[in-house]
Image (spheres, rainbow, N blue to C red):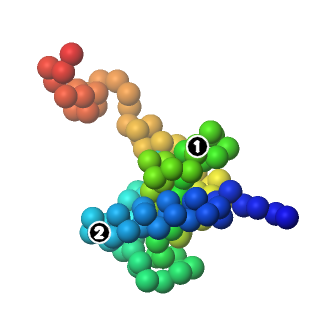
C-alpha cells in the first residue's frame, strides 16, 4: 500500500485549520514564498486552478519539517507547484544589491546596536 505523507489524515486536518484561519484572517492574496513574491488573488472555492488555495510545508519533509500548523502556510496552487517541483529562484533578491556602501546604511536601522 502506497501512503503519501502529504495525504495523511493529520495533514488533512492541519490543511483545513490553516485554510480556515487564513480565510478568517481575510488573506485573499497569495503571500508567495522565499524569494518568490506572488500576490495572486486567491480563490478559496476552486480546486486545481492556478489561483486555488493550497497548503505548503514551510520546511519540507526532506529538510526535516513536520506536519504541524506552525509548519504550514497557504500558497496559491501555482506557487505550491513551482516550489514542489524544486523550481526556485537561484538568486535571492538581496543579491540584486551590493552588500557594501550606501545600501547597507539604507537597509539597516540606525542605532540598533
Ligand atoms: Zn502564489
Mark 2 → mark 1, Cα distance in angstroms = 25 Å
The x and y percentages for residue 25 are 27, 65
The mark tally for this picture is 2
The answer to whether residue 86 is visible is yes
Q: Badge 1: how crowded within 10 Å, few (<14), some, or many (20+)?
A: few
* Callout 2 touching callout 1 (CB < 8 Å): no
SS for callout 2: helix
* Residue 35 coordinates in the image, percent (x, y): 46, 48
Q: Is mark 2 within 8 Å of ligand 1?
A: no
Residue visible at 33% across and 70% down in the picture:
23
Which type of secondary structure does the marked residue at label 1 adopt? loop
Taking 87 as reference, is 108 left or right? left
Reading the image, the residue beneath label 2 is 24
Q: In which quadrant of the rendered view does residue 106 lie? A: top left
Residue at x-position 21% and y-position 16%: 113
Q: Nearer the viewer, residue 36 or 14?
A: 14
Q: Is residue 20 above or below residue 48?
A: above
Q: Disc 1 marks which residue?
A: 65
The image quarter containing residue 99 is top left
Q: Is residue 94 left or right of residue 111?
A: right
Amino acid at each position: 500500500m502506497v501512503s503519501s505523507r502529504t495525504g495523511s489524515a493529520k495533514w488533512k486536518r492541519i490543511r483545513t485549520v490553516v485554510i480556515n484561519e487564513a480565510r478568517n484572517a481575510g488573506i485573499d492574496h497569495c503571500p508567495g514564498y522565499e524569494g518568490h513574491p506572488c500576490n495572486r488573488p486567491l480563490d478559496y472555492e476552486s480546486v486545481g486552478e492556478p489561483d486555488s488555495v493550497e497548503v505548503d510545508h514551510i520546511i519540507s519533509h526532506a529538510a526535516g519539517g513536520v506536519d504541524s500548523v506552525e509548519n504550514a502556510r497557504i500558497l496559491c496552487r501555482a506557487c505550491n507547484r513551482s516550489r514542489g517541483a524544486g523550481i526556485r529562484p537561484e538568486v535571492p533578491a538581496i543579491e540584486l544589491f551590493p552588500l557594501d556602501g550606501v545600501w547597507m546604511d539604507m537597509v539597516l536601522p540606525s542605532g540598533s546596536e
